[in-house]
Amino acid sequence: MKVRYLGESDPLGLTHGKIYETLAVEGDWYRINDETGEDYLYPPEAFEIVNPTPTARCHDCGKQLTGAGVTVTTDTHSGERRQVCAECARFYKD
């Protein structure tokens, strides 16, 4: 999955607006190679999803997700972070 960094640039970290390929999702955090070439875990709130994985589907309705209209949201009851389509995202409060 490709994500765009929304935070402030850091020459030894990540660059604002740059698109990164996630290496893995671990405990809801994204493992990404930073500007030094090392991989670290980063919180999902610092990114927007640009291109979900090809097989990504909406957690709620099963619709295949595309880059536009993908939302990562938190279920208010379980605290679980989910990828949902734009139609299903309206049922969540973040």
Image: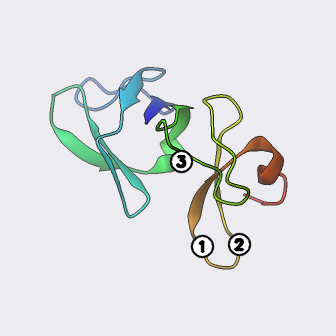
Q: Tag 1, which secondary structure? A: loop
In the image, which disc is placed on residue 41? none
Q: Residue at x 25, y 32 (%)?
A: 34
Residue at mark 2: 76
In the image, which disc is placed on residue 79? 1
Mark 3, Cα crowd under 10 Å, few <14 / some 14-19 / many 20+, is few
Q: Are marks 2 and 1 in contact (CB under 8 Å)?
A: yes
Q: Amino acid at mark 2?
A: Thr
Q: Is residue 82 left or right of residue 20?
A: right
Mark 1, Cα crowd under 10 Å, few <14 / some 14-19 / many 20+, is few
In space, the residues marked 2 and 1 are separated at their CA atoms by 6 Å
- Considering only vertical position in the picture, is 12 above or below 59? above
Return the residue nearer the eye: 94 or 58. Answer: 58
The quarter in which the N terminus is drawn is top left
Q: Is residue 13 left or right of residue 8?
A: left
Q: Residue at x 48, y 48 (%)?
A: 44
In space, the residues marked 2 and 3 are separated at their CA atoms by 16 Å
Q: Which of label 3 and label 1 is nearer to you?
A: 1
Q: Amino acid at mark 1?
A: Gly
- Considering only vertical position in the picture, is 48 above or below 78? above
The quarter in which the C terminus is drawn is bottom right
Q: Tag 2, which secondary structure? A: loop
